[in-house]
Image (cartoon, grey):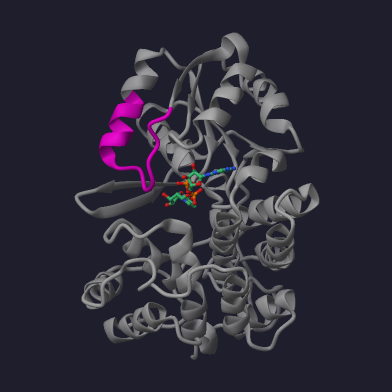
Amino acid sequence: MNPGGAEPDAGNPGFVHETWAARVVFRAGAALTATAEEARRLGLRRLLVLSGERGADTARAVADSLGPACAGLHTGARMHVPVAVADRGVEVARAAGADGCVAVVGGSAIGLGKAIALRTGLPLIAVPSTYAGSEMTPVWGLTEHGAKHTGRDPVVLPRSVVYDPELTLSLPVPLSVTSGINALAHAVEALYAPDGSPLVALMAEEAVRAMADALPAIAAAPDSLPARSRALYGAWLCGACLGATTMGLHHKLCHVLGGTFGLPHAETHTVVLPYALAFNAPAAPRAIAAVGRALGTDDTPGAVRDLGVRLGAPRSLAELGLKEADLPVAAEQVAGQAYANPRPVTAEDALAVLRAAYQGRAPSA
Ligand code: NAD
């Protein structure tokens, strides 16, 4: 156990680091020029292309680029992968005789590809256009009866990831900001994860630096390919941190708020992160220092909040539509589940963090 992922020394006896075998292609234009080649390398000849309705145009272009290796386009992806959506995806993949899937656009499409992989073993290629990071993890999620269940299985890890910063040019600035801060949350929690490593710590600090540089540049010039590339580079590192470690209080809070209360994924992460970080700060000084170095600040939770607020992101759970009466229910759910966190969390603690995030006031430990 090596919280903070520091080098082994007298205080840190060692670490375990596992590298997932995902292949990454990162290049402007790669969605249309590299996906077919990735499929060939994997020996795949009948690919079902997956997206949500809003990503359908991009997915169609990727499907066209596959030529005869495209077995169909299915635009049924939905946020948090409801079980009925996964069932339908499996049916469509079987009916198309697919030997693999290509998930195009956001984490929702990748989530559907993972759900299909979990049931059928079909290999997945991911072509992400948000910063959510799912493409770098063996974690699947399914939502049923108002609760989101997640698990880890190497079969759902995309075999190849095609990062194309050009695809992200159309990501609206507000979503770029919240998706970018969603990504930061992976790097931040990796820095105090019980299964961190020196490599994860290096990736996490670099990821925070890259993303925090890129987001204001994107807000100022959404068409800037260098800024888009830097954000996607940061998102890749954040996703790798997420895949390599076990997340803590912040992810558990967002998981409950998204799965049970239907709050939007990236926005919820953006609002909650400063408060989860402020709560964990006394128990995670190395992580706070690393994020502070990357952001150039002595007030890490405050700077994380300012990054979003300066760029127009939502500040409070109230703004996202949560009701005050939901807070104790969410707190009980969070406290009732087992998860790794540097500081023990009681139901009262979870409620205090949620209340602060609900009100959107300045974070304090
Ligand atoms: P999303 O896939 O739902 O995308 C959000 C919205 O952005 C959608 O309406 C989409 O059409 C639009 N969009 C995406 N890219 C665009 C672009 N380039 N231009 C214009 N519009 C674009 O949301 P997300 O934030 O990418 O992913 C969230 C989902 O991923 C959640 O269900 C979350 O639980 C899951 N997730 C899973 C993991 C994991 O490891 N399993 C990790 C991160 C996120």
Residue 343, placed above or below residue 122? below
Q: Is residue 88 magenta?
A: yes
Could you say where residue 2 lies in the image, as x and y percent from the top left? Answer: 58, 73
Depth order, front residue of 343/33: 33
Residue 39 drawn at (x, y percent): 62, 21
Q: Please state which of residues 316 and 302 is positioned toward the viewer in this rendering.
A: 316
Q: Is residue 278 above or below residue 201?
A: below
Q: Where's the N terminus, which quadrant?
A: bottom right
Whether residue 343 sits left or right of residue 261 in the image: it is right
Identify the residue at the far right of this view.
Answer: 226
Left or right: where does residue 11 sit relative to residue 253?
right
Q: Is residue 246 visible?
A: yes
Which residue is at 39% across, 70% downward? 319
Q: Is residue 162 above or below residue 70?
A: below
Q: Position of residue 257 (x, y in %)?
A: 33, 64
Residue at 75%, 80% in the rendered image: 296
Write the residue at 67% across / 44% down.
Answer: 169
Viewer-nearest residue: 246 or 211: 211
Q: Is residue 294 magenta?
A: no
- Residue 342 seen anywhere in this rendered image of the structure: no
Please state which of residues 195 and 45 is positioned toward the viewer in this rendering.
45
Q: Which residues are magenta?
A: 75-90
Q: Which residue is found at the position 60% from the left and 55% from the top?
A: 176
Number of marks in the rendered image: 0
**Residue 338 point in image, percent of width and height:** 33, 68
